Amino acid sequence: MATIVKCPTCRRDVEWSAAHPYRPFCSDRCRLIDLGAWFCEQRVIPDDRAEDGAGDDAGADEDAPPPQ
């Protein structure tokens, strides 16, 4: 028996199987709506450092090795 999940965009039931290539979305349309929300920054991953300024490494070289 396949697992049933809700489409994150429209909340329709979606069967989690190879027969549904857009899973967890119900369709390509819902997948693109979600992608557009990320591009427009309507959805973001919270970053605690941005709120308090702790860990703010402005100007730090991200490719540099860590200090020893």
Image (spheres, helix red, strand yellow):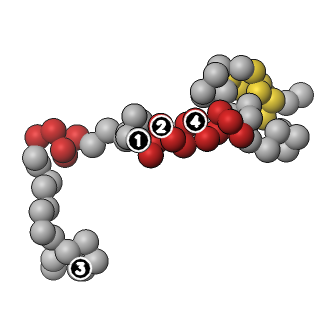
Type of amino acid under label 4:
Ile
Q: CA distance from mark 3 to mark 4?
A: 37 Å
Name the secondary structure under disc 2.
Answer: helix
Residue 59 appears in view: yes
Q: Position of residue 24 (x, y in %)?
A: 68, 36
Q: Is residue 54 above or below residue 11?
A: below
Name the secondary structure under disc 3.
Answer: loop
The residue that mark 4 highlights is: 33
Considering only order in the chain, which callout, 3 or 2, is on the residue closer to the N terminus?
2
Q: Is residue 21 above or below residue 42?
A: below
The residue that mark 1 highlights is: 40
**In front here: 11 or 18?**
11
Front tag of 3 and 4 = 4
The residue that mark 3 highlights is: 64
Cβ atoms under marks 4 and 2 closer than 8 Å = yes
Cβ atoms under marks 1 and 2 closer than 8 Å = yes
The residue that mark 2 highlights is: 37
Does residue 65 appear to the left or right of 36 in the view shown?
A: left
Does residue 23 appear to the left or right of 37 in the view shown?
A: right
Residue 47 location, quadrant: top left
